[in-house]
Amino acid sequence: MTINNASGSALSSLTLTSTEQANVLGSLVLGASVTTLAINASTSLQFGGITTSALRTVTVSGTAATVSLDRIGSALTSFDASGLSAGNVAIILGASPTMNFVGSAGNDMVQIDAGSLMTGFVNGAGASDVLAMYTGLSLTAATGPRFTNFEVLRVASTNSSEGQTFDTSFLSGFQTYQIASGTPRFSLNLNKLANDTSVVFLGTISNASLGMNDASGSTDSLNVTLGNNVSNTDALTNGITVTLRAAGVETIKLHSVGIAGGMELNILNIDAGTNSTLSKVVIDGTQSIRLQSLASVLALTVDASLLTGALEV
Amino acid sequence: MVAASTGLTVKDGTAADASAAFRTGVTVGNAVVSGTLAGYTVSGDDYNLLFTATTPGNKPDLTLTGSGASNMSVGITQGTNGAIDTVTASNFTGATSFNSDRSTVAVVFTGLAAGQAVGVIGDKAVVNGNLTGTYAAGVTAATLNVSGGTKGGP
């Protein structure tokens, strides 16, 4: 859809309403002078993308369950969904250098595009919000604190030339880390994890390393979930294979889940060399699972009494 | 403006009268009809006109003049040949919203004035065609309404 102005210069704002039923739009093309978009959605609204060269400010309000905006142009400086009282926002933020973002009261999904760590702030606001980084972004002391009120960090290794490391110590408030499949040609390293942190693998990945903030002592543990129905493209997965390296960890609490009725195995390759301190794996969940590469791990106890699927070792 | 002799013009009358005049092709109350409607059938109610193209690709020869009609909604939908329907919004005095109503082909509204809204109406079934809303020079604020369950489209 195209909204523009005969003069090409005067039109500065667009108010967009969504009513009656959930509405899906193709791409929205805005005139070159439109700087402000106000979305008032009482029903769910999904865009195929917004093409704009001038859009600076977007507000989202209303009672819709979901407003999904896909990717927005790089001129954006302010996105405020605090007026969306009961729903969720999904958005891909482009390479906007001075972006300020405020999420809705619901469970927002914010994906950061390549190279677009901004100098502004990204505030997930209420509920359980997901911050997704699928690119070569790195968390630093300068960039990490800009992300607030997010509960889930979703990452994937999509670098084409080198491993990718996310230092979680630069973040605060995150409760769960998710690792999507991406294109795992190179390693994905999630470092500085607190004891008993929850890490969810959403898809197959062959070289994930989980680093503890403090791996000393003999009581370090991780909550690891395999298969949570979502890859980084939101495709369903029916059994995933994960090769895991978690140095210094003694206990892995393993949760094996999958799509309803899924018949394939989840497979966890425990890198025997790296996981040299691992002594106990406690498994629960519904999806059958195979543990592999255990040859050099000594005195490993496996408790699968709460697993309703099958266990292969 | 479309010449009355080549299209349907409704002059004056309340929105209800004007709507009835468009639908019946004859004068209703103070809504005076001149000319004949070509290429479209008309349906709707007192405040909503829906023009359904029977020969798509022709610019609708429809004109509403006078000051009687207000808050009227003008909808347009496609015929069978897949050509673009173009409606000159400024031909409809007193209309406040212009909608591509379940149209699977592209619809273009031009000459939209300040305060007029453009929209897409779906029904959870049809894949809506593209909509272009072009406001008149000098208009600074636009309104786009989507409703009824629109589906995709370009």
Image (cartoon, helix red, strand yellow):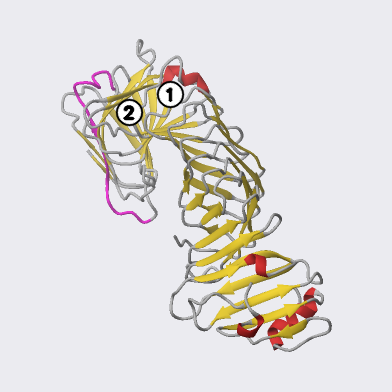
From what the image shows, is residue A151 above or below residue A226?
Answer: above
Can the viewer see residue A85 in this picture? yes
Circles 1 and 2: CB atoms closer than 8 Å: no
Where residue A1 sits in the image (x, y, percent)? Answer: 50, 57
Which residues fall within the magenta stretch? A261-278
Q: Residue at x 22, y 30 (%)?
A: A186
Categorize mark 2 by other alpha carbons within 10 Å: few (<14), some (14-19), many (20+): many
Dot 1 amino acid type: Asp
**Foreground pick, B1 / A13:** B1
Residue A126: quarter of image: top right
Residue at the spot 49% in from the left edge and 35% down from the top edge: A75
Amino acid residing under circle 2: Gly
* Residue B48 visible at all: no
Q: Nearer the viewer, residue A291 or A247?
A: A247
Please give the name of the residue rendered at 61% of the width and 47% of the height, measured from the top-left corner. A11
The secondary structure type at the circle numbered 1 is: loop
Disc 1 to disc 2, C-alpha distance: 27 Å
- A148 displayed left or right of A27: right
Mark nearer the N terminus (1 vs 2)? 2
Q: Chain of mark 2?
A: A
Q: Residue A113: where, in percent of width, then height?
A: 40, 35
Q: Give the label on residue A196, or none.
A: 1
Residue at the extreme right of the image, as rendered: B29
Which secondary structure is most common in the magenta stretch?
Answer: loop
Above or below residue A146? Residue A92 is below
Q: Position of residue A31 (x, y in %)?
A: 53, 48
The answer for which chain carries disc 1 is A
Give the camera-side residue of A149 and B70. B70
Q: Quadrant of the C terminus of chain A?
A: top left
Residue A136's mark?
2
